[in-house]
Amino acid sequence: MRVTISDREFVKKPGAAGARRLRVGVAGLGVVGGGAALELIGAAARYELCAVLVRDREKPRAPELDGVRKYTDVGVFLSEGPDVIIDALPCGDAGRILTERALTQGVSVVSANKQAVFGSLARFHRLAADNKAAFAYSASVGGGAPMVETVRNARNAGKINALTAIVNGAVNYILTLAGSGVSFDEAVRRAQAAGFAEPDPEADLSGDDARAKASILAFEAFGVEIAADKIEVEALDAARAGHIVRDSRAWRQLTRIEKLGDGVVARITYECVDDDGFFSAVRDEGNALRVVNATGADFTCADKGAGRGPTVRSLFADLEAISAAAEASQEISLKNPPPLA
């Protein structure tokens, strides 16, 4: 059976006769976590939503979540015995603590929390391997565009030379509006109203969001985790947006990562892409990636990069892979783990 979330699909497989349902805990019930929890309830034949981790247990939630056990303490949350947790927390520090504790206990983690995994990928992969757990984070970068998988495919086909990507759907949405003459403040307001930008859009506009995603992609491509202060980032403000409005050409926030000598360099800048049909076609909340490897082959992907639907679909793609491995009575592991430096 196919289940559509937004305009993307993932395959929801029926559980095998007599198979134990995978117990899943969800951390964070915001836009993404709330969507994931509701999908789990809808897939009750395959998954059991065993508990959720929230900041405020008394906050009103969707009525479907009324009977779900809600906790504010990480230890109590994990004591429910989940097989897998979905990290959709808005806080990087809290997600990092949760992920470390879960993997140490042999609980698999599927993460959409880029700030939690960025800078800790090598350590988390080792923890997962040591404790026979899975660690997946496709939803932390790219939204509905399978960027992590695309980079792995390119790496398996040959040494990667460079990659270029649009990784922030909120910023791309703002740039699309600015390109049509909408003022910067109004474009930001519309991105927030659409659920693409947070109420405080600073992480998007400053480039911090793109910086974290660039480090994740660099790790996938080259096995190197680039420190935040080593990634050159151009911020988006009213003056920069005003220039784009007056210019009337297609501008995008591009993340470029390449191997230079023994090091890896990443930069995030605003560039005119009129001469690049692939990136100029990426509008609104879209994300896109192009990877070039040593054979000269291009590996690309593109889809919606912001909003509940694309991110939940990506979370469930990882969850399905873990579920399939568990049903086959295999030791849980992800195919093609990233290289470690």
Image (cartoon, grey):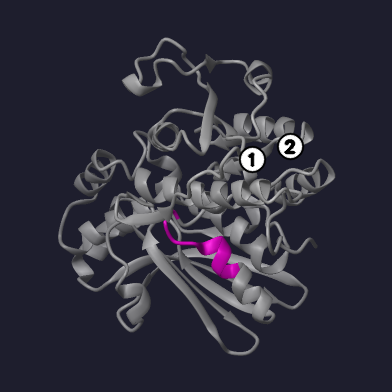
Q: Residue at x 28, y 64 (%)?
A: 283
Q: Is residue 145 magenta?
A: yes
Q: Residue at x 57, y 64 (%)?
A: 149
Dot 1 lies on which element? strand
Q: Crowding at label 1, few (<14), some or many (≥20) Cα neighbours within 10 Å? A: many
In-image side of 232 versus 10 (left or right): right
- Amino acid at dot 2: Leu
- Amino acid at dot 1: Val
31 and 190: which is toward the camera: 31
Where in the figure is residue 206, as x and y percent of width and height? Answer: 45, 48
Task: State which region is magenta.
Answer: 143-151
Toward the right, the furthest residue is 130
Toward the front, the furthest residue is 17
Where in the figure is residue 109, as x and y percent of width and height? Answer: 64, 40
Residue that badge 2 annotates: 103
Q: Is residue 81 above or below residue 151?
A: above
